[in-house]
Amino acid sequence: MEDVTWRKSQRSNDQGGACVELAAFVKGVGVRDSKDPDGPRLLLEPTAFRALLTDLKQQ
């Protein structure tokens, strides 16, 4: 995988909660579990990522 910078929310803490990390890629946004950085990753196209954020904000 490319040399990328994964970022976790500043609201995240070290209490073992469910956190995701995001990374910018040329073709979209990468998403991974912060507790399993070598595990599975998703690559979302920009439009799919924006739709996901919109949906999450409405929850």
Image: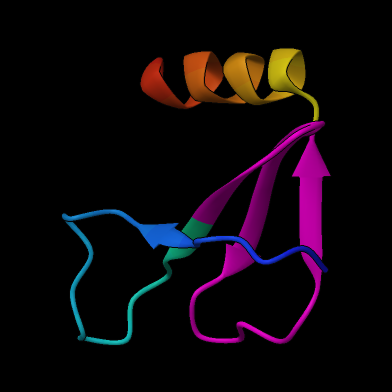
| Residue 51 shown left or right of residue 7 in the figure | right
* Magenta-tinted stretch: 22-44
| Residue 42 shown left or right of residue 24 in the figure | right
Q: Quadrant of the C terminus?
A: top left
Kindly identify the residue that appears in the image at 32 percent across and 86 percent down.
Answer: 16
Q: Residue 33's image quarter?
A: bottom right
Question: Is 7 in front, or is 1?
Answer: 1
Position of 11 relative to 41 (above/below): above
Position of 46 relative to 36 (above/below): above
As for residue 42 lying within the magenta part, the answer is yes
Kindly identify the residue that appears in the image at 83 percent across and 69 percent down.
Answer: 1
Q: Residue furthest front?
A: 3
| Residue 34 shown left or right of residue 30 in the figure | left
Residue 15 lies, in percent from the top left, at 21, 86
Main SS, magenta region, reads strand
As for residue 8 lying within the magenta part, the answer is no
Residue 30 lies, in percent from the top left, at 68, 49
Residue 42 lies, in percent from the top left, at 79, 53
Q: How many marks?
A: 0
Kindly identify the residue that appears in the image at 42 percent across and 70 percent down.
Answer: 18
